[in-house]
Amino acid sequence: MSEQEEVQLPKLGKAPQVRVNGKNWKETKTPFRTSSLSVPLKHRSWERRQKERENLRMIKAKEKEMKDEKEAEHAEKVRRIKERRMAKEEKERLEKMTAILSAKKLARRKRKEKRNKLLRERN
């Protein structure tokens, strides 16, 4: 062997995995390890989880309270609109009734005046 010709020896270690499906160009994936996470999930303390749950409960309660207030305001607005409409309808109905009544009264007065006029002319 000369200096220019170098014999490449195989590297020792793990043998490369040969895929059964033949997709050798794909990268081999390693299994997910929770220990490799920066903040391990399994090391969270019970107290911390309890605090997080309590915070979440408080947030949900506040959201529910805000939603209820908004619904109450909407219901109050709708109630006021309905009351206003009912009052307007009642006012219109009363105006029509008074117009009809005054017309009837006017007609009665005219008839009465006619009778009185005829009676006066006789005398």
Image (tube, grey):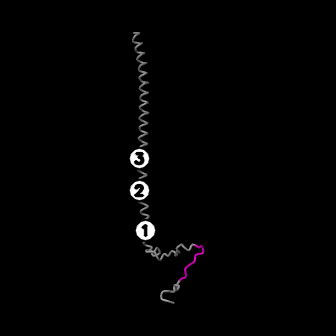
Residue at 45 percent across and 74 percent down: it is 37
Q: Secondary structure at mark 3?
A: helix
Disc 1 versus disc 2: distance between alpha carbons? 21 Å
Q: Which residue is mark 2?
A: 66
Q: Is residue 39 left or right of residue 11?
A: left
**Residue 63, placed above or below residue 82:** below
**Residue 62, placed above or below residue 15:** above
Residue 39 numbered tag: none
Q: Is tag 3's residue or tag 2's residue first in the polypeptide sequence?
A: 2
Q: Is tag 1's residue or tag 2's residue first in the polypeptide sequence?
A: 1
Q: Residues within 10 Å of mark 3 (few under 14, many from 20)?
A: few
Amino acid residing under circle 1:
Glu
Mark nearer the viewer, 3 or 1? 1
Q: Residues within 10 Å of mark 1 (few under 14, many from 20)?
A: few
Q: Is residue 88 left or right of residue 29?
A: left
Which corner quadrant of the image does residue 58 belong to?
bottom left
Q: Is tag 3's residue or tag 1's residue first in the polypeptide sequence?
A: 1
Q: Which residue is mark 3?
A: 77
In front of the other: 67 or 2: 2
Q: Which residues are magenta?
A: 14-22
Which corner quadrant of the image does residue 60 belong to?
bottom left
Disc 3 versus disc 2: distance between alpha carbons? 17 Å
Amino acid residing under circle 3:
Lys
Q: Is residue 15 left or right of residue 76?
A: right
Residue at 57 percent across and 72 percent down: it is 23
Amino acid residing under circle 2:
Met
Identify the residue at the far top of this view.
123
Q: Which residue is mark 1?
A: 52
Q: Secondary structure at mark 1?
A: helix
Measured as percent of width and height from the top left, residue 86 is found at 43, 39
Disc 3 versus disc 1: distance between alpha carbons? 38 Å
